[in-house]
Image: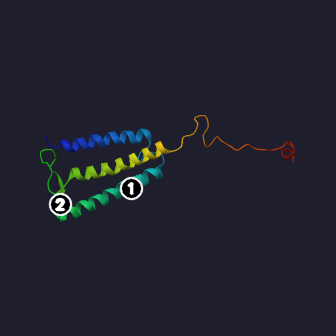
Amino acid sequence: MNGLYLACLLASWAGVTVLDVRWRLALGVPARRSRRTAALVVGAGVVLFLAWDLVAIAAGYYGRGAPDLMVRIELLPHLPLEEVVFVTFLCHLTLVVDALVRRVRAPREHPTTSATTRRPPTTTTRAAVEA
């Protein structure tokens, strides 16, 4: 079955993306600056891992995978399309898991009070208000 590996990668990535957007974890956050930062982190990870792959290919550590499961599109010799998709998925998944762990470990506030509504008590007197 040609393309089965790529189909599994894309299906997994779609699931992670749905969770990311639903829970606003990494690329799904509403703030534009945070999305840009997350995209830059994913991009930097992809560049790093692909550079690592190219060094390993040049050293002869990598060969072809199971051709009956792959689409047989090579971007470079011994660098299949699936590898680029996998590395990008891995970087996105890492950001989502990191954001999820941070959210779970963050201290929780009481649901009736939030940081914006809590104010320290004021001690103004009538004389101070009239002055």
Left or right, 122 with reference to 106: right
Q: Which mark is residue 41?
A: 1
- Residue at 33%, 39% (x, y): give it: 15
Q: Viewer-proximal residue, 125 or 107? A: 107
Q: Amino acid at mark 2?
A: Tyr
Q: Which mark is residue 61?
A: 2
- Residue at 27%, 43% (x, y): give it: 10
User: Callout 1: helix, strand or loop?
Assistant: helix
Mark 2 closeness class: few <14, some 14–19, many ≥20 residues within 10 Å: few
Seen in the picture, residue 27 relative to 76 is either above or below; the reply is above
Left or right, 68 with reference to 120: left
Q: Which mark is residue 68?
A: none
Mark 1 closeness class: few <14, some 14–19, many ≥20 residues within 10 Å: some
Q: Amino acid at mark 1?
A: Val
Q: Quadrant of residue 21?
A: top left
Residue lying farthest left? 68
Query: Residue 38 at x, y = what percent?
Result: 41, 52
Query: Residue 52 at x, y = what percent?
Result: 26, 61
Left or right, 35 with reference to 63: right
- Residue at 46%, 42% (x, y): give it: 104
Sequence order check: which comes first, mark 2 or mark 1? 1
The colour scheme used to paint the residues is rainbow
